[in-house]
Image (tube, helix red, strand yellow):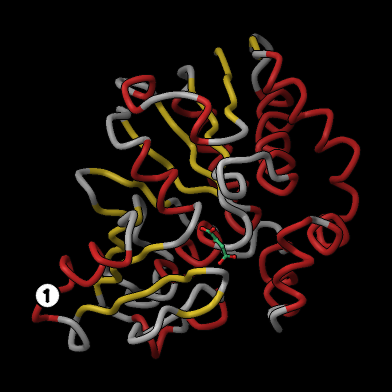
Amino acid sequence: MHIDLLFTPVATNELFFRDKNVVVIDVLRASTSIVTALKNGAREVIPVESVENAVKVSGSLFGDVVLRCGEREGKIIPGFNLGNSPYEYTQDAVQNKSLIFTSTNGSFAMVKAKFARQIIIAAFVNIATVVDYLVDLNEDFVILCAGKEHLFCIEDAVCGGMIIQQIEKKIADIQRTDAAVAAQVLYKHFGRSIHKMLRNSEHGEYLISIGFEEDLKACATVDNVPVLPVYEKGVIKLRRAETTASN
Ligand code: MLT
């Protein structure tokens, strides 16, 4: 099994992902919110790159079965139904709804990987489910960190490193790129207190400064949302539906 990792989506172009298995990580907060929304019964999440596209895609169904969701500068977009706090994606808010989702880095990374064979959405909250799936799949894959405004961010790298660390315990024969090794080293250094790592991260500090301190706790929790969101044909849905609120 060969494991690659990209610290930012701008490290390569769209065609790099063609025919690859890709795991997209945006711990703060897009991946965590999407995983939470699907666990709480959202019918699907449709990631789009721009606010304009979110408005266009939601069209006349907006507000009924279709919600516009996401953030700019961490805050809810004016006229949208939900922002990007995982706490907003409750069963009451999202059950049976289609969520048109745009965020600064997370949805950009997801859309960038659109030519992949398959795309899995990962965060700390669903990490064991992602690892189990990758171990069963037993194929090469690439971890794509959403990063922060086209640059490195620590929390996505540490989460990627944790995935690699857990896979290494289960599969003897893995080859890692230098970036994958570096992420694993970061996990070994910071993984003892994920919440502290998030609090000290650039984006974590920013979220605290705009009033989202509690979100960091939700995003730091490991394995409390055991679902596997898969992004296929423009739509993110749960691969296994057994744990959704709608069942
Ligand atoms: C993003 O996609 O950039 C984010 O998830 C930012 C955030 O809302 O914290």
Residue appearing at x 43%, y 71% in the figure: 70
Tell me which image quadrant ligand 1 sits in: bottom right
Quarter-of-image position of residue 125: bottom right
State the SS at label 1. Answer: helix
Quarter-of-image position of residue 27: bottom right
- The three-letter code of the residue at mark 1 reads Gly
Q: Residue lying at the far left in this picture: please name it.
A: 60
Residue appearing at x 32%, y 81% in the figure: 95
Towards the viewer: 201 or 184 = 201
Q: Position of residue 141 (x, y in %)?
A: 49, 23
Residue 98, compared with residue 112, is above or below; it is below
Q: Position of residue 185 (x, y in %)?
A: 84, 28
Residue 28, compared with residue 181, is above or below; it is below
Residue appearing at x 8%, y 81% in the figure: 60
Residue 143, compared with residue 159, is above or below; it is above
**The C terminus lies in quadrant:** bottom left
| Side of 239 relative to 150 (left or right) | left
Towards the viewer: 223 or 185 = 185
Exactly how many numbered labels are in the figure?
A: 1
Residue 148, compared with residue 152, is above or below; it is below
Residue appearing at x 26%, y 43% in the figure: 232
Q: Position of residue 36 (x, y in %)?
A: 50, 69
| Side of 103 relative to 122 (left or right) | left
**The N terminus lies in quadrant:** top right
Q: Position of residue 162 (x, y in %)?
A: 72, 38
| Side of 66 relative to 151 (left or right) | left
Towards the viewer: 241 or 66 = 66
Q: Is mark 1 within 8 Å of ligand 1?
A: no
Q: Residues within 10 Å of mark 1 (few under 14, many from 20)?
A: few
Find disc 1 in the rendering and name its residue. 59
| Side of 184 relative to 226 (left or right) | right
